[in-house]
Amino acid sequence: MREMVRVRIELERQRLLLHQGESLVASYAVSTSRDGPGEQIDSGCTPRGLHHIRIKIGDGEPENSVFVGRRPTGEIYTPELGQQQPQRDWILTRILWLTGLETGRNRGGRNDTLRRFIYIHGCPDSEPMGEPLSHGCIRMRNSDLLDFYPRVDTATIIEVV
């Protein structure tokens, strides 16, 4: 039987920690919200508390695939494409769509993580990691996301602290 997998995202350290059983098996630099932590709709903040992965999106898509509305556009991100559209918030490679587990904190009403479209997703490699610069989501390097994605499933608990 496979040991339980848990994920802890530490906002202060800008790290995603992957545990299997009691062992830390991987640690990745991330970028969370530039507006800090928070749960309100339209806040642009990264929601705290317990979540789980609601939906995994992007199986089989190539690295640097571009997503809009959780669907691949057929584009592959390149630095040239990024220069042509510098204001675009790039969602690349894979999407792990989160849903809150704590009613009143991150589930339901104006604090609903799922309705806020909060994801763990890839971004251009030129984007800094370890600094809070996202619009609320948790950004990862594409290579790290490709390593992380198959290690989790839709039952995986994600704790954001």
Image (cartoon, rainbow, N blue to C red):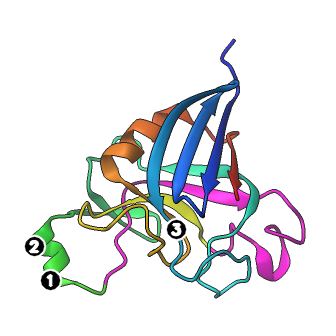
On screen, residue 28 versus residue 154, left or right, reads: left
The answer to whether 9 appears left or right of 122 in the picture is right
How many marks overall? 3
Depth check: give the residue in front, 120 or 25: 25
Numbered disc 3: secondary structure: loop
Q: Which residue is mark 3?
A: 32
Circle number at residue 80: 2
In the picture of the structure, the residue carrying the numbered disc 1 is: 84
**Looking at the figure, which quarter contains the C terminus?**
bottom right
Decide: few, some or many residues near mark 2? Use Cα within 10 Å; few <14, some 14-19, many ≥20.
few
Q: Which residue lies most toward the top here?
A: 1
The one of 113 and 70 positioned closer to us in this rendering: 113
Task: Say which residue appears at 15% left-offset and 65% top-offset.
Answer: 78
- Residue 129 at what x, y percent from top left? 38, 61
Mark-to-mark CA distance, 1 and 3: 25 Å
Provide residue 70's location: percent of width, then percent of height. 46, 64
- Magenta segment includes 125: no
Q: Is residue 98 magenta?
A: yes
Compared with residue 25, is residue 99 higher up or lower down, i.e. above or below? Answer: below
Q: Which portion, as a residue range, is magenta?
A: 88-116
